[in-house]
Amino acid sequence: MVFDKRRIVSEAIGTFFLVLMGPGAVMVNAVSNGAVTHLGVALAFGFVVLVMVYALGNISGAHLNPAVTLALCSVNRFSFRDVVPYIMAQCFGAVSGAFVLRIILGKVGDMGATFPTIPTMSAFGMEVLLSFLLMFVIMTVVADDRTPKAFAPISIGLAVSLCALMGGPLTGASMNPARSLGPALIGGIWDRHWIYWLAPVVGMLLAAHIYEWLQLVADEINSEKSGRL
């Protein structure tokens, strides 16, 4: 089986910078006595996703997230054979980004790791909902040809910032198993880490399949209308 190495490298690079800039902003906020602010951290996550999707979207699709890869595969919008290489590349990029942060800044700000500040099941539910929202936006880009492709990175970046603004103080608003794995592994912070694997996958699978169903219904209605004209 032959894989396109460029796509795999692209996913690793994109996830590397996602962790470098996202959790990195959390760490800088800690060492600068809050100079970045919660709003700044949320914007950092959204902006880095925006620029990475612009930069790498035409190469690998810029998933940058194992849950996105699995969800797209589940609705036949991504090749099954590429799932494992993509996830491995994303996790490698995330761990590498966290490792560089540890070298530059040390173990400050909990390495930007994600852990709940609310009860476990509430945190799980929150991560499912945030992940659902993000994937729902991604599906409008992937599945709807009416969405201008040039605006796709902006809508996805805004969705990430929105989720981080609301959910960041509660769960870290991960929505991404690789993003959580990097700081957890390098920082040794594993508090209820399972949430950040299971919840994004559940939320994004639900979003992908519900959007596909809604799109199918809309297409059927449009077809009926066209047939009556």
Image: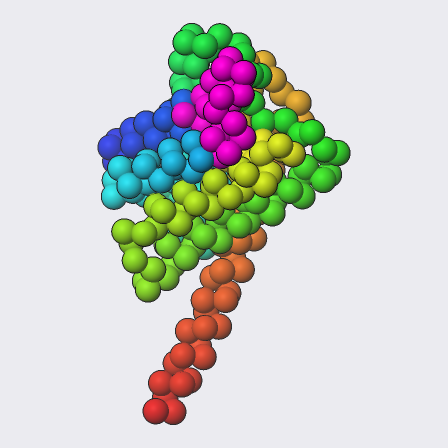
Q: Is residue 60 visible?
A: no
Image quadrant occupied by the C terminus: bottom left
Q: Position of residue 8 (x, y in %)?
A: 31, 32
| Magenta residue check for 31 | yes
Q: Residue furthest bottom?
A: 228
Q: Is residue 49 left or right of residue 163?
A: left
Which residue is located at x 55 percent, y 38 percent?
A: 165
| Magenta residue check for 4 | no
Which residue is located at x 40 percent, y 79 percent?
A: 222
Which residue is located at x 51 percent, y 43 percent?
A: 162
Q: Position of residue 183 (x, y in %)?
A: 52, 20
Nearest the eye: 10 or 53: 53
Magenta segment main secondary structure: helix
Q: Is residue 2 left or right of residue 50?
A: left
- Quadrant of the rendered image containing residue 113: top right
Nearest the eye: 161 or 4: 161
Q: Position of residue 178 (x, y in %)?
A: 48, 29
Q: Is residue 107 visible?
A: yes
Residue interval drawn in magenta: 21-42
Which residue is located at x 53 percent, y 37 percent?
A: 164
Q: Is residue 139 above or below residue 165?
A: below
Q: Position of residue 36 (x, y in %)?
A: 48, 24
Image quadrant occupied by the N terminus: top left
Q: Is residue 86 left or right of residue 4?
A: right
